[in-house]
Image (cartoon, rainbow, N blue to C red):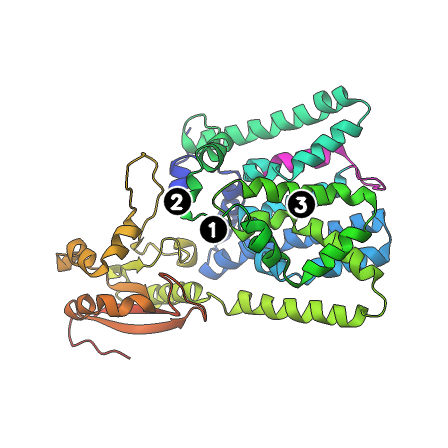
Amino acid sequence: MVFNYGYLTWEWTERLRGYTYPLIFASIYKILYFLGKDSVQLLIWIPRLAQAVLSVVADLRLYSLMKQLENQQVAKWVFFCQLCSWFTWYCCTRTLTNTMETVLTIIALFYYPLEGSKSMNSIKYSSLVALAFIIRPTAIIPWIPLLLRHIWQEQRKLDLILHHFLPVGFVTLSWSLIIDRMFFGQWTLVQYNFLRFNVLQNLGTFYGSHPWHWYFSQGFPVVLGTHLPFFIHGCFLAPKRYRILLVTVLWTLLVYSMLSHKEFRFIYSVLPFCMVFCGYSLNHLKTWKKPALSFLFLSNMLLALYTGLVHQRGTLDVMTHIQELCYKNPNKSAASVFVMMPCHSTPFYSHVHYPLPMRFLECPPNLTGKSQYLDEADIFYLNPLNWLYKEFHNNSTLPTHLIIFSILEEEISAFLISRNYERTAVFFHTHLPEGRTGSHIYVYERKLKGKLNRR
């Protein structure tokens, strides 16, 4: 039996991602639908709230673990560092696979056989690691040194592998294969496809590349933020039994450094490991403890509030505007939207929840090996005005609404005027525009009568 739910993006079309993680939220949507509560606000907020609850569970597990390994005082400072991290605030409610990977990693660490732990359980932690691998295959990277250490220190190595690791791996991988078989219609090992695309073929460079040292020179310092000096200080103070956590952090940074495509969120899973050392640093501070706490809290909260509430918020606000148009416009059945922005700049139907014809500039990578390959977005930005005239040579195909960044307006103004588009809404996006991204987002609506009247 094949369940035809449609593909989410080209990543599912190419079978690079499985349906295990989307199935979690799809189940939530189904429950809401059967309860008659599938409003757009619930569809937007319930996944975020669900992810937030899971993040809370993970943070509490981190606190409990440190309380077992040390004492309540050290656990309190580790917990404080985790809670006031700006990057934790930025990511913990987002339904990214990296967020779920981090949640599962923290909870698995709670059951990992660290010296002094009272909650160690090989089946539980290996099951969580396996689930993280199913959701995001690169989640195995931080666990390679941890798994090797466990095997090395285990006296009954063969028993651990044959009666714990292999059965857990078999069950979780079988589960993943069956779920993906139901949706794709054929047997597919998406974890291999994911690793082949991102590691063996290194096609992720299509979306940008950075020098090998980027994680050490920029990525890691930015993610840690003002925690960095406390992390370095804590590395010299923490007991030797935590050396494996530091090795895990360095190993993960080194492995990700070998891949050309780099993002801050890729190393989110090792951030809680770093908080252990930051907590040790705070615990040993005497004279400067209060100023240090104030500095950490204020610097992180300001950055968390800015990145969470102000920076790049326009892409969410504009979709709220489009959603409101669908339900307030009496002629909504004739409406259509074209997002002329870098691909995947905005959410899509999850934030509209209405069968409104929508389109955006696509940017699939070069999967066919063509020389001098350009995606639709690249072709558009080479000459936006010419592209629009060719694409919409017939007025009957024109969308009723266009969404653009402010930086594009002047370049396509001739098209907007000639096709009777009028700017009807403006949304702030960022104080730091760069490249194809503007400081504001404009919504243009096509008027069948009258002249263009810019606000």
Horizontally, residue 88 falls left or right of residue 71, namely: left
Q: Is residue 329 visible?
A: no
Answer few, some or many: residues within 10 Å of disc 2's Cα (few below 14, many 20 plus, some between 14 and 19). Answer: few
Classify 129 as above or below 390.
above
Residue 388 against residue 140 in the figure, above or below: below
Amino acid type at circle 3 is: Val
What residue does disc 3 label? 249
Q: CA distance from mark 2 to mark 1?
A: 38 Å
Identify which residue is drawn at 85% across, 58% down.
73
Quickly name the residue at label 1. Answer: 33
Q: Secondary structure at mark 2?
A: helix
Labelled disc at residue 55: none
Give 339 or 183, whichever is nearer the viewer: 339
**Tag 2 and tag 3, C-beta contact below 8 Å:** no
Question: Residue at the location (42% across, 39% down)?
Answer: 203
Looking at the image, residue 319 sits to the left or right of residue 414; the answer is: right
- Residue 140, picture quadrant: top right
Residue placed most toward the observer, 47 or 340: 340
- Residue 221 lies, in percent from the top left, at 61, 57
Quarter of the image where one finds residue 217: bottom right
Kind of residue at disc 2: Phe
Instruction: Indicate the position of residue 348 as horizontal and vertical percent values.
Output: 39, 55
Instruction: Give the quadrant of the C terminus.
Output: bottom left
Q: Are marks 2 and 1 in contact (CB under 8 Å)?
A: no
Q: Which mark's residue is nearer the viewer, 2 or 1?
A: 2
Please name the residue that numbered disc 2 is placed on. 206
Q: Residue at x 66, y 24 (%)?
A: 167
